[in-house]
Amino acid sequence: MQSFREYIVTNEAMTMATRQKMKAAFRKNKAKIALGRKKAAKKLASPEKLKARAQKQARNVLIKKLLKNKSKNQLSYAERQALEVKLAKKQGAVLKIAKKLLPAVKKADREKMKARRNDQSS
């Protein structure tokens, strides 16, 4: 069985009902999510996690290009869904950009850990 995140990634763009369900789920589990984030911040990210971060950054690069001077927050639900459909068609471009961004993402993660260690030691 797929996890919720895998389901969202592999299937079509989110509908308004799906967005509302996700909102409710996040609200319900926000304490667990916060605790998980706190634990994860202390560890070096796995290669899969780094790859996912690079892909997210690549998606944001394409979103900026597609929206020009608009913010994603200014879009209606229908416009966001249309944007998701466009991005789904550009998955190859997302992967190509992500591959270029990966070294920078890795470096940023290492820097974050180094800074965290320095804060704890002093």
Image: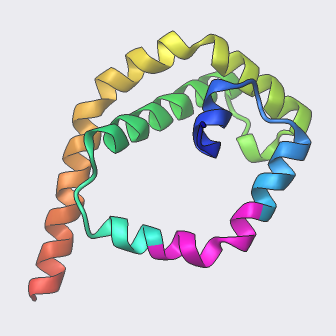
Q: Is residue 110 magenta?
A: no
**Residue 112, position in %: x, y?**
24, 61
**Residue 54, position in %: x, y?**
39, 35
**Residue 102, position in %: x, y?**
28, 32
Q: Is 119 drawn above or below residue 115 in the view shown?
A: below
Magenta region, main secondary structure:
helix
Which stretch is magenta? 25-35
Residue 44 image-quadrant placement: bottom left
Q: Is residue 31 magenta?
A: yes
Q: Is 86 drawn above or below residue 23 in the view shown?
A: above
**Residue 68, position in %: x, y?**
67, 27
The residue lying toward the viewer, choosing from 71 and 47, is: 47
> Which residue occupies 83% across, 39% down?
75
> Which residue occupies 65% across, 34% down?
7
Q: Quadrant of the N terminus?
A: top right
> Which residue occupies 44% across, 68% down?
37
The residue lying toward the viewer, choosing from 67 and 4, is: 4
In the visual, does 69 lie left or right of 100? right
> Which residue occupies 60% across, 23% down?
65
